[in-house]
Amino acid sequence: MSLWTAAEAAAATGGRAVGDWACDGVSIDTRTIAQGDLFVALKDVRDGHEFVAQALEKGAGAALVSRVPEGVAKDAPLLVVDDVLKALERLGAAGRARMHGKVIAVTGSVGKTSTKEMLLAMLSGQGRTHASVDSYNNHWGVPLTLARMPADSEFAIIEMGMNHPGEIAPLTLLARPHAALITTVAPAHLEAFDDITGIAVEKASVFDGLPIGGAAVYNADVETAAILAAKTIDKRLHGIAFGMHGFDYKLKDVAIQGDTTVVQAEVDDKPLLFKLATPGRHFAMNGLGALAIVTAVGGDLARAVIALGRWTPYKGRGVRETIHLDPVETGVQLDLIDDSYNANPTSMAASLEVLAGAVVTNGIGRIGKGRRIAILGDMKELGPDAIALHAGIAHLDATKSLDVVHCVGPLMRALYDLLPEERRGDWTQTAEEMRAGLRHKLDAGDVVLAKGSLSMKLGLIVDAIRKMGHPVSET
């Protein structure tokens, strides 16, 4: 059964179908387009209409366009609309309207994608589950996710993000979730907000799309929890608070044992024990919130706990790898924590805590002593307090327990200048410069964290570390 026929897509968008076609998926990228996809010619850095011919050559079933592009036959399989983005939104709305399962919205300053992936792991074994791909969580990512959703999905997990005020409400009204989760509220995107209160108000708007009585799950440990709780009351929702101060899902203890996190919690005053196959208090919190959502949409808690124990972090968000530096001697290795996709003060502190607790290996490298090494890039969009927030990293207990801290970017200079000489590594303006001498900065037995905002390109450093040897995924 096709995802969209020409007639269905035309009716949903109000467009004009050229030809009698059917599509099995929806794509915006010719690099990853699959046979039979509907290619959506969005305008971003470049106009998607420039790639329509290429998409059709690669096997796209049809293309969603506002005009017939040059080099494309007039009888090519097309869906012609007035505005491509608005048509994608209407297609997403139609996809949502025909799906009768449970829809979950996930937002938060930190942990959206990881929590979405946790939910995907937990619910996939309990029913046909559809979820956002990568971090497709904005004004085109959410409608694209809905447009891709099979009509017979029993669960759907929709990630929602924002950079400016007023962005989340339209997304949640489009997705019309049955339950929504706010992972946390933290200083991120402060350039667009006066303070963290404004961020909390924006995050709380995810509850606007819920029906009366819908499950509104939120982090009770954040300083703005009262704003989130007030929203649940105002909208007549079923508020569910999780965390150390949670009155529904209460976090009692988090113990990190090597590469495992053991979590003790209480649900309705009954004990709940679950494990994660990766270290991190922040992952424990996200897991607890995710379990609350699973129960809220009718999932089986016991099965969810088992599935959560098999979950591993998403690429660039805390993935741990062992890099074998010698093709013959397997014990000559270092450990890499790839958290290079994004960064703000809260996620930075969480990642440094994980690194501080990591187990190093002595006696196998040229130095002879394993070290905990951080390579940190600028945290972007923090507003007028950006320098102070970067400098504040120096005062974290986790930072003080590290062996070496290397810094990348002009903002990270504030941290670098405060580091004591024995822990101060190198500072460079760019990731490219840091990458140049990387091999001499690292040794067998080390555990290395790469963390920074995406635009700082710490992924280049991660790739360079991988190329030092043969990576073996630990997760």
Image (cartoon, rainbow, N blue to C red):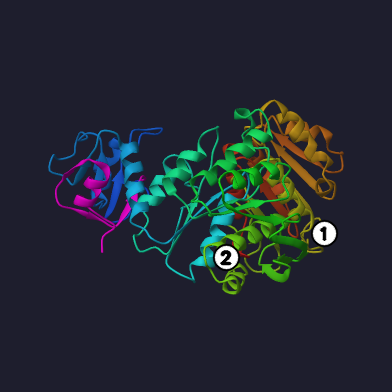
Question: Looking at the image, which residue is at 26% across and 51% down?
Answer: 60
Quadrant of res 272: bottom right
In the image, 170: left or right of 38?
Answer: right
Span highlighted in magenta in the image = 1-29
Does residue 4 belong to the magenta stretch?
A: yes
Q: Secondary structure at mark 1?
A: loop
Q: Is residue 418 visible?
A: yes
Q: Residues within 10 Å of mark 2 (few under 14, many from 20)?
A: some
Q: Is residue 124 left or right of residue 204?
A: left
Q: Is residue 464 left or right of residue 363?
A: left
Circle 2: residue type: Thr
* Residue assigned mark 2: 295
Residue 265 place in picture, x, y as percent:
73, 65
Residue drawn at the location 83% of the way across and 34% of the way down? 418
Camera-side residue of 78 and 287: 287
Q: Residue at x 83, y 38 (%)?
A: 419
Q: Is residue 173 magenta?
A: no
| Residue at the extreme top | 384
What amino acid is at disc 1? Gly
Q: Is residue 273 above or below residue 70?
A: below
- Coordinates of residue 455 in the picture (x, y in percent): 57, 37
Looking at the rendered image, the quarter that the N terminus falls into is bottom left
Q: Does residue 262 appear in the picture of this structure?
A: no
Location of mark 1 (residue):
368
